[in-house]
Image (cartoon, grey):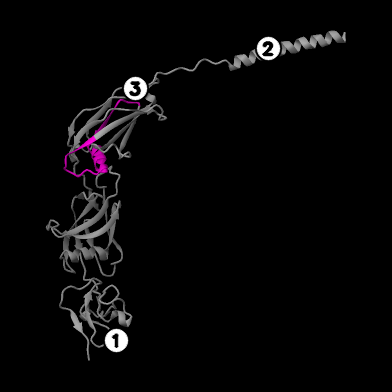
Amino acid sequence: MKHILKIFAAVITIIGFTTGCNKVDNLTKVDALPVYAAGVSPVLSSSLTSVAPTIADTNTAVITFSWTDPKYGTDLSNTKYILTIDSTNKNFGAQNNTKTVFGVLKTTMTGRELNAYLLNIGFKVGVAQSIDLVLTSSYKNNNERYLSNVITVKVTPFADPSILVTQNTSVVCTLANGALPSNNFWWTPTFTGYTGTINYTMQYDSAGKNFVSPIEIPVGASLLTKGLTQSEMNATALNSGIPGGTTGKVEYRIKGVTPNGTTMYSNVVNVTITSYVPILRVYLPGSYQASTGNGNDWDPGTAPELIRDLRSAVFNKMYYIYIYLPAGAQFKITVGREKCVCGFCIGKFGY
C-alpha cells in the first residue's frame, strides 16, 4: 500500500511540474516588436526670399516656413522640429536662436518675433542682411534626428523702441518734502522678445527743445522702471531751465542700447513741475586738502563743506567756514561735488 502511494505522489509531482512549465512558456511568449522604417531628411522651404517688416507688422504673420514629412513610423503628433536661425555662412553658431514646434509641418513668424531673432544675432536696424535657416526633425524624445537642407532669406530688422508712461503728468515739489517719492516712470522693453542685455537711460529736457542737449539719468541693464523723489524731479526742472518757485514742463524719454550699439528712443512724455529753490551746498576744494587731512587735492568730492546761513534774508546767499589753510594754498569754491571749470572762483591764501 505504501509503495502504491509513493508512485501516486510521484505521478502528481510530474504532472504539476509539467503544468507549471506550460504556464511559464505562456508567460514568456511575446509578440514580435514592430519594426519601423527609418525616416528621411525633411526639405525646408520659405514663403518668401526677402522680408522687411515694420512696426505695423508687430502682431502680423510676415513669413511662413514649411517642410516635408520626415516619414517617421509613428503619428505626426509624436514628432519635434527645431528651426535654427543664424547669419549667412556662420555655420549656425548661434544655437540658442531657435524655434521649436511639435507635430506640424510649418510655422509662421510675426514681424516682432522675426525681429527679435534678428536682433539676437546682432543685426542692425534698417540694414538688409541675409540669414540661413536649417531644420532638425526628431521624435519628441530627440531620437532619430535628421537635418534639412539650408535655405537663405534676406531680412531687414525694424526699430522697436520702448513705450514710456508716467504715473503723474503734473507734480508739485517742495523743499520740506524733497526726500519723498514724487513720480514713477515705466516702459516696455526695447525690442520685445530680444534675449540680450539692454542698457536703459532716462533722458530729459525742457519742453520743445527736441532733446538737442538732453541730460541723462542712468537706470541700468534690463530695468523697466524708475522712480524719482521730489528733490530729483525738482532737479530735472531746474536743469531744464525752470527757475525755482515757478512752474514749467519737462520732457522725458528712455534710451535703450543693445551690446552692439543699436540705440532706440521711446516716445516722449511731459510732466508739469512746480519747482522750489533748493539749498545750495558749497565746497572748498584746493591744493591744501591732502596736507591738512581734508581729502585729496582739488577734489570737490572730498573737500570740506561751507556752513549754510539758513536765515531767510540770506538763504542760499551766505556761507562761511573755519579752516586752517597753509601759506600759499590755493582753492576754489564749487556748488555741488562736481569739479568747477568756470575759471573765476579760484582763490589764494597768504599772509
Is there a contact, CB below 8 Å, between mark 3 and mark 2? no
**Sequence-first tag of 2 and 1:** 2
Looking at the rendered structure, the kind of residue marked 3 is Val
CA gap, disc 3 and disc 2: 49 Å
Magenta stretch encompasses residue 117: yes
Q: Which disc, if any, is residue 52?
A: none
**Sequence-first tag of 3 and 1:** 3
- Residue 151 visible in the snapshot: yes
Image coordinates for residue 222, horizontal then vertical, percent: 30, 51
- Residue occupying the far right of the picture: 1
Choose top left, top right, bottom left or bottom right for residue 48.
top left
Q: Which residue is mark 2?
A: 19
Image coordinates for residue 249, horizontal then vertical, percent: 16, 60
**Is residue 1 depicted above or below 241 in this figure?**
above
What secondary structure is found at the residue carrying circle 3? loop
**Is residue 266 depicted above or below 206 in this figure?**
above
Q: Which residue is mark 1?
A: 324
Q: Is residue 146 left or right of residue 30?
A: left
Looking at the rendered structure, the kind of residue marked 1 is Tyr
Image coordinates for residue 339, horizontal then vertical, percent: 22, 72
What secondary structure is found at the residue carrying circle 1? loop
Magenta stretch encompasses residue 111: yes
Q: Characterize the local packing of mark 3: few (<14), some (14-19) or many (20 or more) Cα atoms within 10 angstroms.
A: some
Image coordinates for residue 69, horizontal then vertical, percent: 32, 22
The quarter of the rendered structure image containing the N terminus is top right
**In front: 349, or 185?**
349
CA gap, disc 3 and disc 1: 89 Å
Q: Characterize the local packing of mark 2: few (<14), some (14-19) or many (20 or more) Cα atoms within 10 angstroms.
A: few
Q: Which residue is mark 3?
A: 40
The quarter of the rendered structure image containing the C terminus is bottom left
